[in-house]
Amino acid sequence: MEASRRDFMQYVVGAFGAVAAVGAAYPILKSLGPNAAAALQSKVDYDVSQLKPMDVRVTSWKGFPVFVMMLPTPFNWNGPERNNKYKNHNRDILGNHNVYAIIGKCTHLGCIPLWKPDGDSAMNPSNVPVFHCPCHGSIYTPWGDNISGPAPLPLGIPPQALNGNTLEIGTPGFVKKFWDPYT
Ligand code: FES
């Protein structure tokens, strides 16, 4: 009887010890996880009601610069399409959507490309709207497909949904998964 009571007390002490250990470890484990600010950025709602056709706005998602685009409908693209193994990759992913978000980070060495809605002299024909990376001259279509210069891949595309006038960046919708050229 004595022995079993002693066993019971050992269990109780052991259980309290385990709870205390978990309690002590929790703040350490929590500090290793993504912080609240980063978690907040994993979904970004962007109001597109003020955008006009050919507008591009910049926001950020998960630490990436993001271009929020609005193209006219219909939009006729007269420029070259693409010169890598992902032929028309971004254009295919984005389909017929005229409001969308793409990652604004050049796939060459990471600069932020500039939006040139009236074209760029580096292009022929030069009046085709493009993104032009100022660092080493890479050029991308409005969908982010790379068409000239040293950039090896299209721009990334975050998962996204359009809900009324809100572009929900980070929410699976008409783009379901993050197209990440870096992985
Ligand atoms: S970083 Fe954009 S072309 Fe080099």
Image (spheres, grey):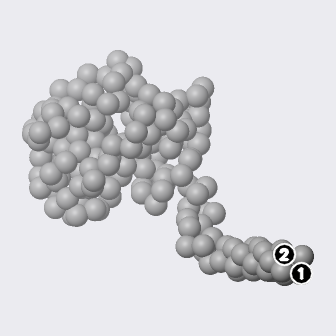
Rendering coords of residue 60 (x, y %): 48, 54
Q: Which residue is mark 2?
A: 4
- Specify the label residue 2 is tagged with: 1
Rendering coords of residue 106 (x, y %): 26, 55
Residue at (23% x, 34% y) in the render: 89
Rendering coords of residue 50 (x, y %): 57, 36
The answer to whether mark 2 and mark 1 are in CB contact below 8 A is yes
Rendering coords of residue 77 (x, y %): 23, 26
Question: Which of the pair 28/67 is nearer the observer?
Answer: 28
Question: Which of the pair 38/70 is nearer the observer?
Answer: 38
10 Å neighbourhood of mark 2: few (<14), some, or many (≥20)? Answer: few
Give the amino acid type for the residue marked by disc 2 in the picture.
Ser
Residue 29 can be seen in this image = yes
Q: Is residue 77 left or right of residue 179?
A: left
Between the C-alphas of marks 2 and 1, the distance is 6 Å
Question: Which of the pair 183/20 is nearer the observer?
Answer: 20
Q: Is mark 1 within 8 Å of ligand 1?
A: no
Q: Is mark 2 within 8 Å of ligand 1?
A: no
Extreme residue in the top direction: 74
Residue at (48% x, 56% y) in the render: 62
Element on which disc 2 rests = helix
